[in-house]
Amino acid sequence: MKENVGQKEVRRDIRNSVIAVVLAVFFLFPVYWMIQISFKSDAETFGKILTYYPREFTFEPWLVNLQDKTFLLSLRNSFINGFITMGITLVLGIPAAYGMGRYRVRGGSIFLLTFLVAQMLPASLTLTPMYLIFSKMGFLGTHFTAPVAIAAASIPFAIITLRPYFKSVPISLDEAARLDGCGSVRAFISVMIPAVKTGIITIIVISFLNGWNDLVYSMTFNVGEAMRPLTANIYKFQNAYGTKWNCIMAYGTILVLPVILLFIFLQKYIVGGLVAGAVKD
Amino acid sequence: MRKRSLSMAARKSREAYCFIIPAFIYMLLVLGYPLIYNIVLSFKNVNVKNLTKGGAIFVGFQNYIDLFQNDTFVLVLKNTFIFTIACLVFQFTIGFALAMFFYQKFRLSGPVRGLLLVSYMIPMSVTGLLGKNIFSNAGLVNNLLGKFGVSGPEWLVNTSTALIAVIIMNCWVGIPFNMLLLISGLSSISPEVYESASIDGANWGQRFLHITIPLMKGSMLSVLMLGFIYTFRAFDLMYIMTAGGPLNSTDVLGTYSYMLSFTQYEFSKGSAVAMVLFVCLFIVGLFYLRLLSKEDD
């Protein structure tokens, strides 16, 4: 009798796992599709028959991209976008989350409301005015314009995600630091930040990806191709490659690669952050 | 003694402001000021001609009146709502089903659940590229349909099918996100509630209707509202996949506003469209914030 129940459990476990794998294969098939096209030869890409895997495997489409000067500049710009966005977010977001999580402040709920609302505002709303402002100041076509705008979305995310982390750190921890003679800034840097390490890794990853994934700000504030990141130069390369889908998909795969690598290695931080950022507290 | 503790409190409060104010000022400068600028802009007639020379004047509600008398704008507004509602329906129901499935404990539940999120993480512009490829005439979708003897339409060429293709691509991104949030909602229901219901003889359907749904009401509502806020402002996907075409059939408020501002350089008209987008989001956003503050109590 007992064995029967156990066997039933095992069978259920196997059945569910099989269903899960089938779902994952179905769901991730488009990603596989993109990657496999990126290793096809021109002849196979333009062939009459649609093949589901490269019959003759070639790195040619990758090399076409990697030998293109504009591509390499765009790649660099994507990294610049990611890192500047991350920098602004960390410098402004972490202290604000600390201030809101650790202190009872008059008007604290107004601050929180402001950041919640800020997170909901669409890019379209600030795009035109920001373009006109940057244009008057002569800032268009510089590396920091897009990250400045993107950070306005990732700072609220950082605050909403990190605030509960700071709240949950035991009070005795920073009191001890203060008794040791630490000023509040030193207590913040040397005690509090290490205590919320998990949350901070989440912010680092997500704010970098916000910068990396941005399309609309980067293409609006930078007209020159040499200043645009990969996302914003998709059009240029689509026109250049026509229907050479193998080259276009190699482009897309390279653009996705850092995202997938970050995801594989830091999945637990990303997943936790997505839930925390969307559902307050 | 009392005075000292008061000054302690004052000092603490000042300290807190020092931490919060820089981020707050940043938001005012980068979001608050442009937001007000955008409102003003939508009541003027700024375009590429008078931008540098000056001479733009206030035109009252003229931009808004023009918009609502323009058939293209009405179509765009309709598209935005169809897109948003269709995406919400599919990504929510499928996301919910997947959440129920992956909430069960089995060996591959955790890893596969994480894997599904890949589609949510990749840049929307790449999702657009992919959509353009698999919905092309001889692409993957029509190839698969062909295997079942169905000859698929020219998805991105027909005005009646292009929006469907865009919706499918967006759901591909939205489903795992909905699933993730709904799983965290499901985890907040105590298993004891289910156990006692099972003992009372409630079957699966009864438990779902009388326990899961009522207890999930809050998180279901917040997932739907959040979904609305994120879907209604779509831009990247259409911009890359269809550029709003054919014949504006996949144009939404985000892309239309961009086109007015940065292809036609009618900045005031573009910002008026953005204002319409904002007002719609604002209404839903208010409900969402009220829901959040209720959960706080």
Image (cartoon, rainbow, N blue to C red):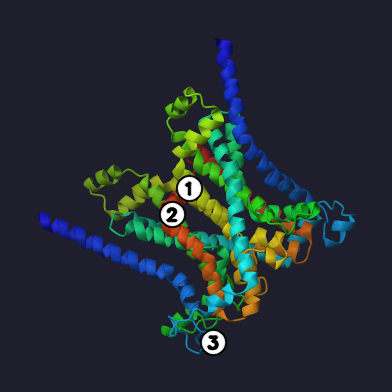
Residue projecting furthest to the left: A1
Q: Residues within 10 Å of mark 3 (few under 14, many from 20)?
A: some
Whether tag 2 and tag 1 are in contact, CB under 8 A, the answer is yes
Residue B235 visible, this orientation: no
Q: What residue is shown with label 2? A: A266
Residue A201 is labelled as 1
| Picture coordinates of residue B232, whole percent (x, y) | 59, 57
Three-letter amino acid code of the residue under disc 1 = Ile
Q: Amino acid at mark 3?
A: Phe
Label 2, label 1: how far apart the Cα atoms are: 9 Å
Where's residue A67, x and y in %? 59, 75
In the figure, A194 relative to A106: above or below?
Answer: below
Neighbor class of circle 1 (other Cα within 10 Å; few <14, some 14-19, many 20+) is some
Name the residue that disc number 3 marks: A46
Assign a secondary structure to mark 1: helix
Spatial CA distance of label 3 from label 1 is 44 Å
Judged from this view, the residue extending furthest toward the bottom is: A48
Q: Kindly identify the residue that appears in the image at 45 percent across and 42 percent down.
A: A197
- Give the percent coordinates (x, y) of residue A155: 59, 45
Mark 1 falls within which chain? A
- The residue that appears at 65% across and 77% down in the rendered structure is A239
**Pointers 3 and 1 in contact (C-beta within 8 Å):** no
Report the chain holding disc 2.
A
Amino acid type shown at disc 2: Leu
Q: Position of residue A276 (x, y in %)?
A: 47, 46
Q: CA distance from mark 2 to mark 3?
A: 38 Å
Determine whether the residue tagged by mark 2 lies in a helix, strand or loop.
Answer: helix
